[in-house]
Image (cartoon, helix red, strand yellow):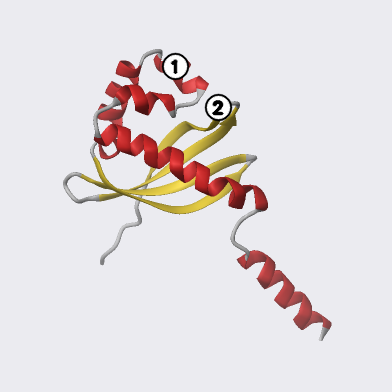
Amino acid sequence: MRRICLTLLTALALSLPATAQENAAAPAIEDVIADQMRAFRSEDVDTAFTFASPGIKGLFQTPERFGAMVRQGYPMVYRNAEVGFLELREIDGTLWQKVTVRDASGAYHVLDYQMIRTEDGWQIDGVRLLRQPQVGA
């Protein structure tokens, strides 16, 4: 009986959605990413740049440079047609939000957004394109 209870408790703990920090942060993080995506869709790189962390702003210096990098390196973000949010998770003390993006041609992409909390609220500290699993024979 004790073994069954321990197994059930372990299964329950592993199936819990997210930590309290992740649960509290999720709506604000999703809002930041969605707002930046809307700004890119409108080609408003000045507003899109405001959602970047101080480190990203320091790296690119101007909204124009930042916009050019996104346009060239992440065209699915710059010309996004649809955005969806998957899991938010903590990795080594950092929150990562997994996002699906449908680009202007209808293709889907999965990206990971590294988020940091600043005195201005949540900001985007990096993005990486995730490889999609191969499907087929």
**Image coords of residue 127 (percent x, y):** 42, 35
Instruction: Please name the residue shown 47% across and 15% down the image.
Output: 58
Quarter of the image with the N terminus is: bottom right
Q: For the view shown, which residue lies furthest in the left direction?
A: 105
Sort mark 2 into few (<14), some (14-19) or many (20+) by Cα contacts within 10 Å: few
Tell me how far mark 1 sits from mark 2, CA to CA.
18 Å
Give the number of the mark in front: 1 or 2.
Answer: 2
Q: Nearer the viewer, residue 91 or 134?
A: 91
Instruction: Please name the residue shown 53% across and 48% down the image.
Output: 26
The amino acid marked with disc number 1 is: Leu
Instruction: Please name the residue shown 71% across and 70% down the image.
Output: 10
Q: Nearer the viewer, residue 99 or 46?
A: 46
Sort mark 1 into few (<14), some (14-19) or many (20+) by Cα contacts within 10 Å: few
**Image coords of residue 129 (percent x, y):** 37, 41
Instruction: State the count of labels.
Output: 2
**Image coords of residue 67 (percent x, y):** 30, 23
Q: Mark 2: which secondary structure?
A: loop
Tag 2 residue:
120
Tag 1 residue:
59
Q: Mark 1: which secondary structure?
A: helix
The amino acid marked with disc number 2 is: Asp
**Image coords of residue 104 (percent x, y):** 19, 44
Q: Which quadrant of the figure has residue 9? A: bottom right
